[in-house]
Every structure is written in structure tokens, then in C-alpha cells.
Image (spheres, helix red, strand yellow):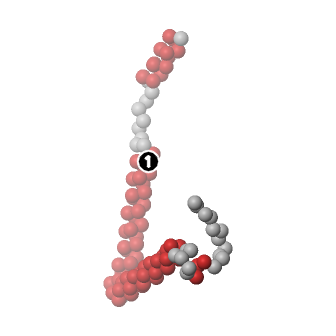
Amino acid sequence: MEAAAEHAATVSEHRPEPRFAAPSAVASGTAQQVVSQVVQQAKAAVEPVLERNPEVFDHLAAAGSELLAAYRSAVENQERRWTTRGTGSRDDEAGPGEHIDLD
């Protein structure tokens, strides 16, 4: 039994130190490099267009605002439908879902 313990101690003493960073640190660094490269490429592609056509940015910003407003409206309408169920609204009609009584 002593021989096994002595062998284990000897093996652990001679184990080489890891030469590489932890995989998560390496992956994080690589991901940051990739993101940085993508951002630089996007800037390189967009900047000439904006310089030649400055109104494009205004148009895209307005379109983005309109899309956000449409999304918010859709979410608010759906939330209103969910919260008004059972209060006599038009949502009392039978739908494709099944009512589950939680009481």
C-alpha cells in the first residue's frame, strides 16, 4: 500500500505544468478578435456608402425606429390579449389552445 502511495506522489511531482491558457480564456480571446474583425469589416463597408449618401443613414435610422414601434405595438397587443382573457373580451371565444384551471 505504501508503494502505491509513494508512486502516486512521485508521478504527481513530475507532472509537467500546462503550457496553454484555459480553453475558455483562449476561446474568449479568439471570440473578441473575431468580433473586432467583423466590426472593422462592417465599418469599412458602410463608411464609403455613408460618405457618398449621407441621407441613407437617416433613412435607415427612421426605418429602424418604425420597425421598433411596430414590434412594440404587436407585443403590447398580445400582452393585452393575454391579460384580458376571461374579462368578457372577444378572446373568450374558443381558440386553438386549452384552458388550464390553476386553482
Q: Is residue 71 left or right of residue 100?
A: left
Between 83 and 103, the one nearer to me in the picture = 103
Q: Is residue 64 above or below residue 12?
A: below
Quadrant of the image occupied by residue 97: bottom right
Question: In the image, what residue occupies the spot 38% across and 63% down?
Answer: 36
**Residue matched to label 1:** 24
Question: In the image, what residue occupies the spot 39% across and 53% down?
Answer: 29
Residue 27 percent across, percent down from the top left: 44, 51
Give the residue at the far top of this rendering.
Answer: 2
Tell me the amino acid under the disc marked 1. Ser
Residue 15 percent across, percent down from the top left: 45, 27
Between 1 and 38, the one nearer to me in the picture = 1
Decide: few, some or many residues near mark 1? Use Cα within 10 Å; few <14, some 14-19, many ≥20.
Answer: few
Q: Is residue 78 visible?
A: no
Between 50 and 66, the one nearer to me in the picture = 66
Question: In the image, what residue occupies the spot 50% across and 73% down?
Answer: 83
Q: Is residue 38 left or right of residue 98?
A: left
Q: Secondary structure at mark 1?
A: helix
Q: Is residue 58 visible?
A: yes
Q: Is residue 78 left or right of residue 33?
A: right
| Image quarter of the C terminus | bottom right
Between 69 and 55, the one nearer to me in the picture = 69
Residue 77 percent across, percent down from the top left: 49, 79
Q: Is residue 14 above or below residue 2?
A: below
Residue 25 percent across, percent down from the top left: 40, 48
Q: Is residue 69 left or right of residue 93?
A: left
The mark tally for this picture is 1
Question: In the image, what residue occupies the spot 33% across and 84% down?
Answer: 51
